[in-house]
Image (cartoon, rainbow, N blue to C red):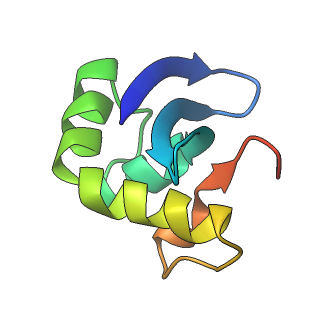
């Protein structure tokens, strides 16, 4: 998975991961990270990157599930793909 930065309009981090030979672009909401870290403020970039590294497998699985037409399990169901946004 590659982190492509933040989309301030969507308040989400843009990430890309290969799924079935296709680079899939998705959005990980800052709110999801805040909630899972127990923060009542916006997380810093370092906190988000550390969180993404820790939850790499779950984020990639959620993106794969969405790409193949499924719905990821909560709380990762808040991750969307670019074509859904």
Above or below, 53 against 66 in this view is above
Q: Position of residue 26 (x, y in %)?
A: 61, 42
Quadrant where the N terminus sits is top left
> Which one is nearer the viewer's eye here, 85 or 61?
61
Q: Position of residue 78 (x, y in %)?
A: 60, 63
Q: How many marks?
A: 0
Q: Quadrant of residue 3?
A: top left
> Which one is nearer the viewer's eye here, 69 or 82?
69
User: Residue at point 58% right, 56% down?
Assistant: 79
Compared across the picture, whether 74 is left or right of 37 comes to right
Compared across the picture, whether 10 is left or right of 55 comes to right
Compared across the picture, whether 78 is left or right of 41 comes to right
Compared across the picture, whether 29 is left or right of 45 comes to right
User: Residue at point 27% right, 50% down?
Assistant: 56
Residue farthest front in this picture? 21
User: Residue at point 33% right, 48% down?
Assistant: 39
Q: Quadrant of residue 57?
A: bottom left
Q: Position of residue 9 (x, y in %)?
A: 76, 25
């Amino acid at each position: 998975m590659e982190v492509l930065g933040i989309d301030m309009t969507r308040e989400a981090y843009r990430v890309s991961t290969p799924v079935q030979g296709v680079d899939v672009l998705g959005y990980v909401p800052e709110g999801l990270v805040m909630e899972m870290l127990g923060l009542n403020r916006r997380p810093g970039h370092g906190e988000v990157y550390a969180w993404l590294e820790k939850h790499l497998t779950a984020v990639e699985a959620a993106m794969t599930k969405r790409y193949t037409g499924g719905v990821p399990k909560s709380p990762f169901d808040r991750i969307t793909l670019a074509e859904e946004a």
